Image (tube, rainbow, N blue to C red):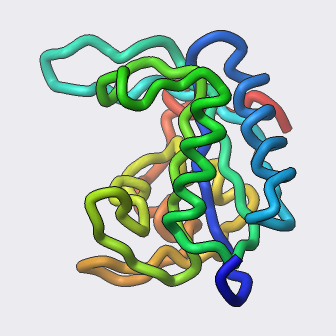
Amino acid sequence: MTGQQRTISIAAGANQGDAVASVRSAFAALARSALISGARLSPLYRTAPVRVGAQGPDPGGDYVNAAIVAESSASPEALLALLHEIEQRGGRNRAGSPHGAPRPIDLDLLTVADLTVQSAALTLPHPRMRERAFVLAPLADIAPDLVVPGVGGPSLTVAELLHRLGPLDAGQVRRIEP
């Protein structure tokens, strides 16, 4: 731990094996970590995969997605290392899988309070979270008022960002549990 507690948000997803169990297992590992406290898991959603390229095939079957909100005083780099460690224990090989490939677990650090970071290893807030309903819908369930720092634009709440996406296509993003 490096200082005062800050609110963090994480996206979780999986589309290989028992994806529901993988997301829940990753959450349990995060909740047990000494680096975070007060972890909350959103309801789970089933979402269509994002196309990797205009010409390429969909990267795999539907994903199970969720969001996690917690408190931490750890550095963003320490949090990222924790997420990668949990992914590895869950069967993910980051080095051996291309971008967009199906995966047994995927954990993305979305925000660390109002920090903005731009490095080779990490960008905060997550650079594509503002355009992804499969990230914003679960996050809005547990933290609608969480402010996402603006980078080249205004800081907005998760609820405002989700509203800007317009109506959600139930075939693309649908809650699978209450």
Question: Which residue is more in the foreground, 112 or 175?
Answer: 112
Looking at the rendered image, the quarter that the C terminus falls into is top right
The residue drawn where x is 35% and y is 83% is 154
Image coordinates for residue 33, horizontal then vertical, percent? 80, 55
Q: Is residue 24 above or below residue 124?
A: above
The quadrant in which residue 16 appears is top right
The quadrant in which residue 56 appears is top left
The residue drawn where x is 65% and y is 59% is 140
Looking at the rendered image, the quarter that the N terminus falls into is bottom right
Image coordinates for residue 155, horizontal then vertical, percent? 43, 82
Total labels drawn: 0
Q: Is residue 79 above or below residue 146?
A: above
In the displayed structure image, the side of residue 17 where residue 59 appears, left or right:
left
The residue drawn where x is 72% and y is 26% is 22
Question: Which residue is more in the foreground, 73 or 146?
Answer: 73
Image coordinates for residue 24, horizontal then vertical, percent? 79, 34
Image coordinates for residue 100, horizontal then vertical, percent? 35, 27
The residue drawn where x is 83% and y is 52% is 31
The quadrant in which residue 175 appears is top right
Q: Find the residue positioned furthest to the bottom.
A: 4
